[in-house]
Image (tube, rainbow, N blue to C red):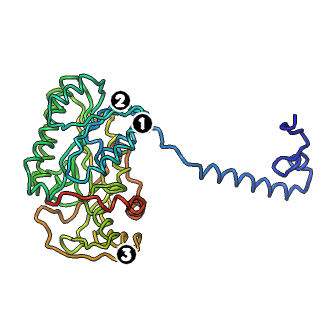
Amino acid sequence: MDSVKSIGEPWYGFTNQFLCCDINPVLTLWLWFRILLAVSLILYIKPSRMEKMNIEYKNVLVTGCAGFIGSKISETLLEQGIIVVGVDNINNSYSPQLKEYRLSKLQRFPDFTFYKFDVKIFDSLKELFQRSCIDAVINLSARVGVRSSVENPWIYVETNIIGTLNLLELCKQFEVKKFVLASTSSIYGKNTPPFIENDQADCQLSPYAASKKGAEALAYSYHHLYKIDITIPRYFTVYGPAGRPDMSPFKFIQRIAEGIHITVYGDGTQERDFTYVDDIALGSIAGLKPLGFEVVNLGSDHPVQLNYVIKLMEEYIGKKAEIQYQPQHLADMSITWADISKAKRLLDWQPKITIEEGIYNAVKWYMDNRDWAKDIWFAEP
């Protein structure tokens, strides 16, 4: 048959005699080296699949699944073959269009089921637990934002404390043994950095931070009383593509790109432990392992000044920022800095994405989606 080559027929330009080394051996070795090098490069640049994670639970409830971090955690779980039940109320704290965009990426997965309601509504949650076979809960449903919480603290208590209480109570009733509660570096308040999990943290600077501390206290009581295995990751300034528009990375990128001034509270020398969202997702999922009760910092362990981040944005966007400086807000912390030795030890986790790479990715996402991302808004406090 014409499609079958005979033994002596050329193969990629080489004859069988050549492959049998019937020519100059030095030349043969050199050519074989080039072939092996080419094959190695092909294998090296081949798109790599995400490393398989050891996840004990196969049916995970993710609340706040349309949020910035919740959507990334849900996507990562689905890529790992985990069945995800997602809950989000798609509120108007910022553009629902951005939340719908994140949600649309999850709805491509056949193992994803979405329910739209508020975790404050106990009966809706209970019906979901009755309907679904849930092995573990990752609670990212929360009202977030330091300054906004000063203006409307009640809604923070309702979602962050009552919502968490509802979920814990249903975990007790339905014997769900694993609960991951997303928390925040804002809890550390005026503590001296770097922040360590067992530091006393009783002086929160905002109702937001206080509500998250209250949720942590509730979580411990349910662990103590009902033996629910609970991990509490404390997140440090999470950023990345399709991020929260009320936070400086998204807000500043948008405004610089569109020629709108940015407002910096303070002189820009305040430091944040910026942590890329993909790293946060992997650390949160690692927290599904049995640990008893543990609070774990997830941060970069490398705080950088806000002024440096702005310079990166200017460089990647190709525009100079118009900056208006305002006095530092009383609820703002001067520095956040995570000691992540516990995360390394318990979760075998450490961040991989540098601030330079992460801001580049965030800028690229915005410019690629600029036709609609330029209209994304958030509710100003």
Residue where numbered disc 1 is placed: 109
Give the answer, above or below, for where 60 lies relative to 145.
above
Instruction: Kindly indicate whether the residue at mark 1 contacts the one at mark 2 (C-beta within 8 angstroms).
Output: no
C-alpha span from label 2 to label 1: 18 Å
Q: Label 2 neighbourhood size at 10 Å, few (<14), some (14-19), many (20+)?
A: some
Amino acid type of the residue that numbered disc 1 sits on in the rendered structure: Phe
Picture coordinates of residue 281 (x, y %)? 35, 46
Give the answer, above or below, for where 259 lies relative to 185.
below
Circle nearer the N terminus (1, 3): 1
Picture coordinates of residue 220 (x, y %)? 16, 36
**Residue drawn at (87%, 55%) of the image:** 25
Picture coordinates of residue 364 (x, y %)? 42, 62
Residue where numbered disc 2 is placed: 57
**Residue drawn at (16%, 73%) of the image:** 326
Which quadrant holds the N terminus?
Answer: top right
Residue where numbered disc 3 is placed: 319
Q: Mark 2: which secondary structure? A: loop
